[in-house]
Amino acid sequence: MTVRMPVELAQARLTLAEVARHGGGVAATEDARALRSAFMAAHTDAVYDELTAGRSRGLRLAELAQAAATAFPGLVPTREQLARERALPQADKDGHEIDQGIFFRHVLRSPSAGPHLLDAMLRPTPRALSLLPDFLATGDVDLGSVRLERRGGAARLTMCRDDCLNAEDDRQVDDMETAVDLALLDPGVEVGLLRGGVMTHPRYRGKRVFSAGINLKALHAGGISLVDFLLRRELGYIHKLQRGVLVEDGASWRTPTLAKPWVAAVDTFAIGGGAQLLLVFDHVLAASDAYFSLPAAAEGIVPGAANLRLTRHAGPRLARQIILGGRRIRADEPAAALLVDEVHEPDRLDRAVERSLERMRGPAVTANRHMLNLAEESPDEFRRYLAEFALQQALRMYSTDVLDKVGRFSAEKRVQPR
């Protein structure tokens, strides 16, 4: 399929390529981005159809961005541009990922291209498919930052980045999506559990920790990417936790996805991205000494889809207190009931988790969670939110205040929760 465009926009495409080759100051960058946005506004569906052969093949985020860089020079950064930027601290980059944000904003806004991309991201990853035979045989796999074990009909995912208190980066997002895929594809798994592992950090030695959120040191060093972390995280494993994994198994007349109920157990704290995760789980337990926070405004970034989901869970006032004001919610205070289903003393949490897993294995749980998820958040609502998130988060990643904050954080000698 060939993209056809008016002469004036064909000329705009040439202008974009020329600007991309020669660079320029702030004004030139702004003009180039305005042209890119205008081009995509007029031709999103035609561009997407050419990249995906008329939507006959599904391309994941990184594949789609690379295909666009090749087929439409100057529209998004090339692999070489991204590789050069990847080696630089965040503050020294030129911000080419903002152009990816423009591109994905338009793709996700499209009522035809956007759902197709969502489906492509719900398919199992090649890494998970390659590991599946061994996991089916052994029921155990160590992915590096995540360990996965099948026991008693439950897939037990343990986040084990004790070097950073389970703060997430590109590596952990890849491991998490692989683990979620394996759990969903395994017919011996009826329910999933996510929990933090035991830490070796001096302040938390011997204790489980759920998650310290985004790895700000990695962000400062330039190691957090828009496509492979910020967008893949939302459209990949978190969306799969909610909707399931898309498969071609001959039973698509029933449902095209394999979905299962999920339980989360929070020890010590769930900060930032850790707290975001809880909003898609079917049952959440916490130790009585744990706390939750989403310090997005303090960090200067957008907390994934939490702005969409937290208001539904906690109401608009409390959501603003948490996201804009940085309010920390303790598991033992009344407001925690809006985020957590059960709170137990730390020494009783293990037994409570097992009881919860048993309840979630009920025969009608999967069908009812499917209907609840549809009622609470339609795929189109999620898609439209992520379209705006793609651009706003890209802009925040390169804002002066964020660069200053992550720079100060990286200068600290001790890893500690924010």
Image: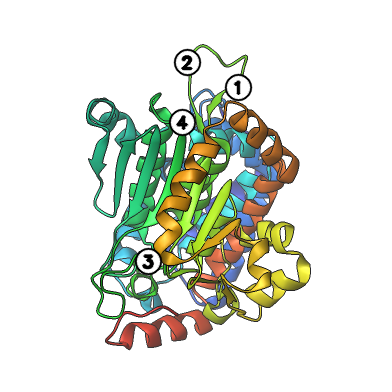
Residue type at mark 4 is Glu
- Residue 271 place in picture, x, y as percent: 49, 70
Colour pattern of the rendering: rainbow
The reply to whether discs 2 and 3 touch (Cβ–Cβ < 8 Å) is no
- Residue 138 place in picture, x, y as percent: 22, 30
Label 4 to label 2, Cα distance in Å? 18 Å
> In the rendered structure, which disc, 2 or 1, sits on the residue that comes first in sequence?
2
Give the image quarter of residue 229: bottom left
Dot label at residue 190: 4
Which mark lies nearer to you, 1 or 3? Answer: 3
Q: Which residue is mark 2?
A: 249
Q: Residue at x 63, y 74 (%)?
A: 333
Label 2 to label 1, Cα distance in Å? 10 Å
**Residue 65 appears in the picture as rendered:** no
Label 2 to label 3, Cα distance in Å? 38 Å
> In the rendered structure, which disc, 4 or 2, sits on the residue that comes first in sequence?
4
Q: Residue at x 58, y 26 (%)?
A: 363
- Residue 168 in the image: above or below residue 326: above
The reply to whether discs 4 and 2 touch (Cβ–Cβ < 8 Å) is no
> In the rendered structure, which disc, 1 or 4, sits on the residue that comes first in sequence?
4
Give the image quarter of residue 10: top right
Determine whether the residue tagged by mark 2 lies in a helix, strand or loop: loop
The reply to whether discs 2 and 1 touch (Cβ–Cβ < 8 Å) is no
Label 1 to label 3, Cα distance in Å? 36 Å
Determine whether the residue tagged by mark 4 lies in a helix, strand or loop: loop
Q: Which residue is mark 1?
A: 255
Observer-nearest of 306 and 190: 190
